[in-house]
Amino acid sequence: MIALLRGSVVHHAIDSVVIDVAGVGYEVIVTPRTAAQAPVGQPATLVIHTHVREDAIVLYGFLTHHERALFLRLTTVTGVGPKLALHALQALGPEGLHRALVQGDEKVLTTIPGIGKRTAQRLIVDLADGIRALATPTGTAMPAPTGPEHDLLLALKDLGYPPAQIDRALLDIRPELDQGKSLDELLRAALRALR
C-alpha cells in the first residue's frame, strides 16, 4: 500500500496531480485546494490513501496526516464515499470540517455540496465519539473539558444525551461556563439550550 509520495509534479489538473517519483508517474486524486499548492515543476509531498476497488486502484492525496484521517473517518459513514469526502474537505477545509463535526454543526455541514440534512445528521451521530480524539490540524487533540464543564458533561451523559448534542449545548452556554456558576445553574442552562 502506498502511504506517501515525494517527487516532482509533472501534470496538474483541478482535481488531480501526477507526481514523478524516480521516473514513475503516479496520478493522485486531490482537492482543488491541494492541487493549487502543487504547481508543475515543483517538488511535492503528499500523504496518500490507497483505495482498492474491484476495477481500479485509486490514490487520494492530502497535504497532512490530519486531512487524510478526516477523509478516512468520513468514508466510514454510510452514504459517504471518497468523492463526497473530498468535496467536504474542499468546501470547509480540514480545520473547518473538524470544527463543524466536533460542534455538531448541522447547518455548516449542509453547506457542503452533496450533503443534505439527513447525511449531516448521520455524520454528526456516527462520528461524534471518535472525532474529538482526532488530532487537530495543529497536531494536538481537542482539549477535554475540565472543572465545571467536565461535571456538566458527565451530568448530561447520565441523562442520556448523545455527545454531539452535549457539545452543541456546551457551546451555546459557553459565556455562562466562564462566569463561575454552580453545576445546578449550568445544568438548567444546558437543558434550556437542548430544548
Image: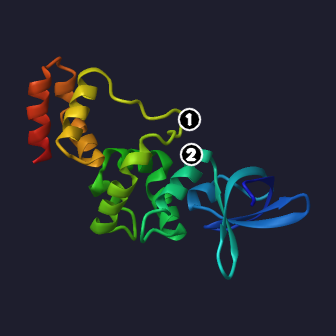
Q: Is residue 113 above or below residue 21?
A: below
- Label 2 amino acid? His
Which residue is at a point 41% across and 30% down the rendered structure image? 143
Binning the other alpha carbons within 10 Å of mark 1 as few (below 14), some (14 to 19) or many (20 upward) gives few
Q: Earlier in the sequence, mark 1 or mark 2?
A: 2
Real-space Cα separation, disc 1 to disc 2, in angstroms? 8 Å
Which sits in the foreground, 27 or 13? 27
Q: Relative to 16, is 164 above or below?
A: above
Q: Is residue 139 left or right of residue 21?
A: left
Residue found at x 29% / y 48%: 164
Q: Left or right of 135: which side holds 43?
A: right
- Answer above or below: position of 149 versus 82: above
**Where, by quadrant of the figure, is residue 17 drawn?**
bottom right
Percent position of residue 109, x then y: 34, 58
The residue identified by callout 1 is: 139
Residue at (38% x, 47% y) in the render: 129
Secondary structure type for disc 1: loop
Considering every residue shown, the one lying at the far top of the view is 180
Rendered location of residue 149, percent (x, y): 25, 27
- Residue type at mark 1? Gly
Q: Nearer the viewer, residue 134 or 105?
A: 134
Disc 1 to disc 2: CB gap under 8 Å: yes
Residue 110 seen from this side: no
Residue tagged 2? 66
**Which secondary structure, mark 2?**
helix
Extreme bottom residue here?
Answer: 55
Looking at the picture, how far across and down is residue 146, in whole percent?
32, 23
